[in-house]
């Protein structure tokens, strides 16, 4: 891999870089805001349990900037705003042939929207508010996987471990290699390993490693193939328990 020796930041790569910056910054800011809102909510619940007035009642809450957004009594999750950002950036990019710096500006908007959506990836995956539950870790996995994919695109790494410059060398062998690695990526994904699937999309050995190892619980693979194999199911559950304990210690 000689991308570090011969690297050119084309307008397209610059756009992906701008998208990545907007994506990471938005995710970080969103997590800070949601943690603060959660801390205030927990403080209010503890105050109510102790019979004290909630913190919001001690002062004027109307001028607060960091708070949940409600319209007509309905809480608006930030994934809704993310979808609107992505939709606007996508429609404009298809409707017009933008060049620098407008292309990069649209990329930032799209990155902002993508971060807002994927930060609540677990919510629309489970169709439940699991943001702060162990299942909510899937949102972080999706965020990290997207960061890896964007970084690989910036560096010019070909998907599925294939360099487009070698397409004419052995087209059939190349096609078989792509299909084989894509199958490994899909197996890794249905085993619940989003991060490994994202890395394996560019590094085939990682996809192979993820495909042969135990599936996460819960995942489609575990539900389909481990129901009649209590030994594998028990090992997978023990591994998932240890993983969640490590994550809980980091929070």
Image (cartoon, helix red, strand yellow):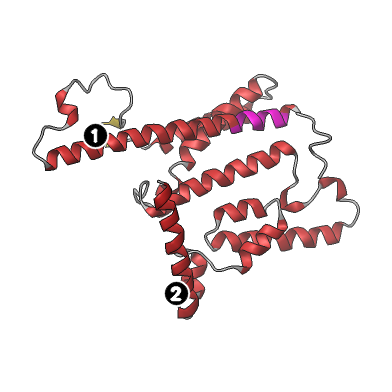
**In the figure, is residue 129 to the left or right of 152?**
left
**In the figure, is residue 215 to the left or right of 251?**
right
Q: How many marks?
A: 2
Q: Is residue 95 visible?
A: yes
Image: magenta residue range: 12-20
- In magenta stretch: residue 19: yes
Q: Residue at x 64, y 51 (%)?
A: 199
Q: Residue at x 37, y 37 (%)?
A: 77
Percent coordinates x, y for residue 22 in the rendering: 55, 29
Q: Residue at x 26, y 18 (%)?
A: 63
| Image quadrant containing the N terminus | top right
The quarter of the picture where residue 51 lies is top left
The numbered mark at residue 209 is none
Q: Secondary structure at mark 1?
A: loop
Classify 15 as above or below 126: above
- The residue that disc 1 covers is 73
Q: Residue at x 24, y 34 (%)?
A: 73
**In the figure, is residue 242 to the left or right of 211?**
left
Percent coordinates x, y for residue 182 in the rendering: 68, 59
Q: Nearer the viewer, residue 232 or 103?
A: 232
Specify the principal SS of the magenta part: helix
Within 10 angstroms of label 1, few (less than 14), some, or many (20 or more) residues?
Answer: few
- The residue that disc 2 covers is 234
Q: Nearer the viewer, residue 171 or 241?
A: 241
**In the figure, is residue 156 to the left or right of 231?**
right
Q: Secondary structure at mark 2?
A: helix
Classify 83 as above or below 216: above
- In magenta stretch: residue 194: no
Percent coordinates x, y for residue 180 in the rendering: 73, 63
């Amino acid at each position: 891999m000689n991308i570090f020796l011969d690297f050119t930041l084309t307008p397209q790569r610059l756009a992906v870089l701008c998208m990545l910056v907007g994506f990471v910054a938005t995710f970080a800011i969103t997590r800070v805001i949601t943690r603060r809102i959660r801390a205030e909510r927990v403080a209010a619940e503890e105050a109510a349990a102790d019979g004290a007035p909630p913190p919001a009642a001690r002062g004027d809450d109307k001028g607060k900037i960091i708070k949940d957004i409600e319209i007509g009594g309905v809480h608006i999750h930030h994934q809704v705003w993310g979808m609107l950002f992505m939709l606007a950036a996508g429609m404009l990019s298809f409707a017009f042939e933008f060049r620098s710096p407008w292309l990069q500006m649209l990329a930032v908007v799209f990155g902002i929207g993508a971060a807002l959506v994927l930060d609540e990836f677990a919510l629309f995956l489970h169709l439940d508010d699991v943001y702060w539950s162990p299942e909510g870790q899937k949102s972080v996995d999706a965020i990290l996987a997207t960061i890896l994919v964007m970084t690989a695109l910036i560096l010019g790494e070909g998907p599925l471990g294939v360099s487009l410059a070698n397409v004419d060398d052995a087209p059939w062998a190349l096609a078989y290699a792509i299909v084989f690695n894509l199958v490994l990526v899909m197996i890794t994904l249905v085993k619940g390993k989003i991060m490994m699937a994202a890395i394996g999309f560019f590094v085939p050995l990682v996809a192979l490693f993820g495909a042969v190892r135990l599936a996460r619980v819960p995942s489609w693979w575990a539900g389909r193939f481990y129901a009649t194999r209590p030994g594998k199911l028990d090992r997978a559950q023990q591994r998932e328990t240890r993983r969640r304990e490590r994550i809980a210690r980091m929070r």
